[in-house]
Image (spheres, helix red, strand yellow):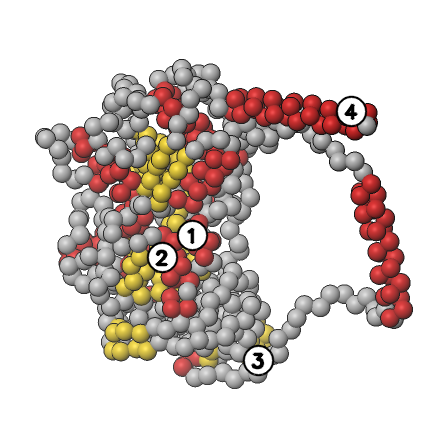
């Protein structure tokens, strides 16, 4: 009985100490000595950018676990800006400014006059728009190595190039001739910051065709194009060859689906990773083929020009001659309310609720540092160190307090550690880099008698050609509609193909495409499973003995654990036993 009482007393004492330690840790997490009223934290609600939504999802989940109640809804940048201006959102995510949204001034003032509460911008993450596509070769093989120059991308999304067998596409892909199928453009419906950002790139890349397209469809020429599904000249969801969707997730999902065959779309790279879309290699101004990984995003954004209010000009990014630069890269902003200051003329006063200020300060501090750690993994790039500092400065503008100086010692952003970008920052090798030719079209070899696609193997004059790696596959789908080409292709009605079996590498084993439109013949090998090293066969008696030998330790361990008295374990909330550090939310690193 005495033993039982002592055991119970010990457990109660441990529970009490654990509860006290937990309360102390929570109080420490929610304390900010730099501001008055730091013991109050209110729920905050934000909305806006779908481009940055995957990043916001990561940040809000982490901070909610730590005790902050931050909500974010991906409604699109324009909706986020409008909601903030109407005081129905505490903050917003956006890729564009009010000056782009409100082209008409209010009461003779500036476009910013629409926002009576005032605002400040600051970058919160670096990202890029991927060109996602779903296309097969004439033999039914999924193409997962498509290359497109910047000019080709612009002409496709302006409707100048209408068919997949365009000589321009063939030239970008070392002569690969794709089927005579109409290109279906998967775009965003309604106003979208991603659309505005992407068509700004298109405008800078192909200004002549952009002007003709915008004029024909009634789109603006001087300000950004926020919406493309309502073109008066036939460009948009009501016309053949278009599918427009209300969100980035729906857009990416549609391209990857079976019914997305022959489609192409634009979306933040993270969505392509989520839905396993094939992503094009884009030719940059340095003549290199690149994909939108963190390494390439960071290289491109070194050419971005930030104004005094930290808004961005991206012309030099689109035409960056840095060899690794991905040209369709851009920062996303967080829009917040800030105290009046001469250095930020758009700031007109702090949040009226101190609890909102405290929560926003803690949330933005997390974004600046620990929030950047996993960005490369989910399809973004961590901010450069100076832009993490901009976030810290923004907290100062918001609270009216001196800004914290960030460094490697107090900020977990991997860029503070020698320019690291984190896990998942480097692109895969280009699977066509070692191929001299992929077909008989423009840009290919006219003297070869057989051509191969990366990842396949074919035998012809000169021996056997090996293949490169593959990133994924899709099968089947239906295309169709009227094809009206303006680049030298035929005009007529085309029919879509049915479902086609695809190997695990994303390339059919029987694909051997002959020059001149003929067909090659090869017998596909039987599927081969991976076979490990030969260890020799064991007789049945040996197998039984081995099983019993492995079972004995398990039984003994179970008996031993069953006799142990339950332990109270470590005290919740206690400091790490090894003296480890904690991040900006009070969690151990």
Residue 66 is situated, as x and y percent measured from the top left of the image, at 51, 32
Depth check: 23 or 355 in front? 23
- The residue drawn where x is 51% and y is 29% is 585
* Labels 1 and 3: the sequence-earlier one: 1
Residue at the disc numbered 3:
524
Identify whether 194 is placed above or below 102.
below
Q: Residue furthest front?
A: 1
- Mark 1: give few (<14), some (14-19) or many (20+) Cα within 10 Å: many
Q: CA distance from mark 1 to mark 2?
A: 9 Å
Depth check: 79 or 142 in front? 79
* Labels 4 and 2: the sequence-earlier one: 4
Between disc 4 and disc 1, the foreground one is: 4
- The residue drawn where x is 23% and y is 45% is 224
Residue at the disc numbered 1:
271
- Mark 3: give few (<14), some (14-19) or many (20+) Cα within 10 Å: few
Q: CA distance from mark 4 to mark 2?
A: 63 Å
Residue 233 is situated, as x and y percent measured from the top left of the image, at 16, 61
Q: Is residue 162 left or right of residue 578?
A: left
Residue at the disc numbered 2:
251
- The residue drawn where x is 26% and y is 32% is 87
Between disc 1 and disc 3, the foreground one is: 1
Q: CA distance from mark 2 to mark 3?
A: 35 Å
* Labels 4 and 3: the sequence-earlier one: 4
Q: CA distance from mark 1 to mark 3?
A: 34 Å
Q: Secondary structure at mark 2?
A: helix
The quarter holding residue 304 reads top left
The quarter holding residue 5 reads top right
Between disc 2 and disc 3, the foreground one is: 2
Residue at the disc numbered 4:
6
Q: Secondary structure at mark 1?
A: helix
* Labels 2 and 3: the sequence-earlier one: 2
Q: CA distance from mark 4 to mark 3?
A: 75 Å
């Amino acid at each position: 009985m005495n033993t039982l009482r002592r055991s119970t007393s010990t457990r109660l004492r441990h529970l009490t100490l654990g509860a006290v330690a937990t309360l102390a840790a929570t109080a420490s997490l929610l304390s900010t000595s730099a501001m008055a009223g730091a013991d109050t934290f209110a729920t905050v609600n934000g909305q806006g950018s779908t481009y940055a939504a995957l990043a916001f999802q990561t940040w809000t989940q982490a901070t909610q676990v730590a005790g902050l109640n931050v909500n974010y809804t991906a409604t699109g940048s324009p909706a986020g800006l409008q909601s903030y201006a109407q005081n129905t959102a505490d903050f917003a995510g956006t890729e564009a400014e009010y000056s782009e949204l409100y082209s008409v001034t209010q009461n003779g003032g500036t476009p910013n006059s629409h926002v009576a509460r005032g605002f400040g911008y600051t970058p919160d993450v670096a990202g890029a728009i991927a060109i996602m596509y779903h296309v097969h070769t004439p033999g039914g093989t999924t193409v997962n190595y498509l290359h497109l120059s910047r000019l080709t991308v612009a002409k496709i999304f302006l409707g100048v190039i209408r068919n997949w067998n365009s000589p321009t596409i063939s030239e970008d892909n070392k002569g690969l001739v794709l089927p005579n199928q109409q290109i279906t453009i998967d775009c965003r419906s309604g106003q979208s910051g991603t659309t505005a950002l992407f068509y700004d790139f298109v405008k800078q890349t192909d200004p002549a065709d952009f002007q003709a397209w915008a004029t024909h469809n009634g789109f603006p020429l001087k300000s950004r194009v926020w919406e493309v599904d309502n073109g008066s000249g036939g460009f948009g969801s009501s016309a053949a060859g278009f599918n427009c969707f209300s969100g980035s997730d729906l857009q990416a999902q549609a391209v990857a689906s079976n019914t997305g065959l022959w489609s192409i779309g634009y979306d933040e790279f993270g969505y392509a990773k989520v839905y396993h879309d094939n992503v094009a290699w884009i030719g940059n101004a340095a003549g290199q083929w690149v994909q939108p990984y963190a390494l390439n995003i960071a290289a491109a954004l070194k050419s971005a020009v930030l104004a005094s209010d930290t808004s961005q000009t991206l012309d030099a990014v689109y035409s960056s001659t840095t060899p690794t630069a991905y040209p369709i890269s851009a920062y996303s902003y967080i829009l917040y309310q800030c105290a009046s200051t001469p250095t930020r003329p758009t700031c007109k006063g702090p949040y009226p609720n101190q609890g909102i200020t405290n929560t926003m300060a803690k949330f933005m501090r997390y974004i600046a540092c620990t929030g950047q750690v996993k960005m490369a993994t989910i399809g973004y790039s961590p901010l450069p160190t100076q832009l993490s500092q901009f976030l810290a400065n923004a907290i100062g503008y918001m609270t009216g307090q001196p800004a914290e100086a960030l460094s490697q010692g107090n900020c977990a952003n991997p860029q503070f550690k020698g320019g690291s970008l984190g896990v998942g920052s480097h692109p895969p090798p280009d699977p066509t880099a070692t191929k001299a030719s992929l077909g008989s079209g423009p840009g290919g070899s006219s003297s070869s008698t057989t051509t191969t696609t990366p990842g396949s193997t074919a035998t012809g004059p000169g021996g056997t050609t090996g293949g490169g790696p593959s990133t994924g596959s899709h099968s089947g789908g239906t295309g169709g509609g009227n094809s009206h080409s303006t680049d030298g292709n035929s005009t007529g009605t085309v029919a879509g193909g049915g479902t086609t079996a695809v190997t695990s590498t994303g390339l059919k084993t029987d694909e051997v495409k002959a020059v001149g439109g003929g067909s090659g013949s090869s017998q596909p090998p039987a599927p081969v499973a991976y076979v490990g090293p030969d260890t020799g066969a064991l007789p049945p008696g040996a197998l039984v003995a081995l099983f019993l030998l492995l079972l004995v330790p398990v039984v003994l361990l179970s008996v031993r654990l069953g006799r142990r008295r339950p332990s109270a374990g470590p005290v919740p909330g206690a400091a790490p036993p090894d003296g480890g550090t904690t991040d900006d939310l009070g969690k151990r690193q």
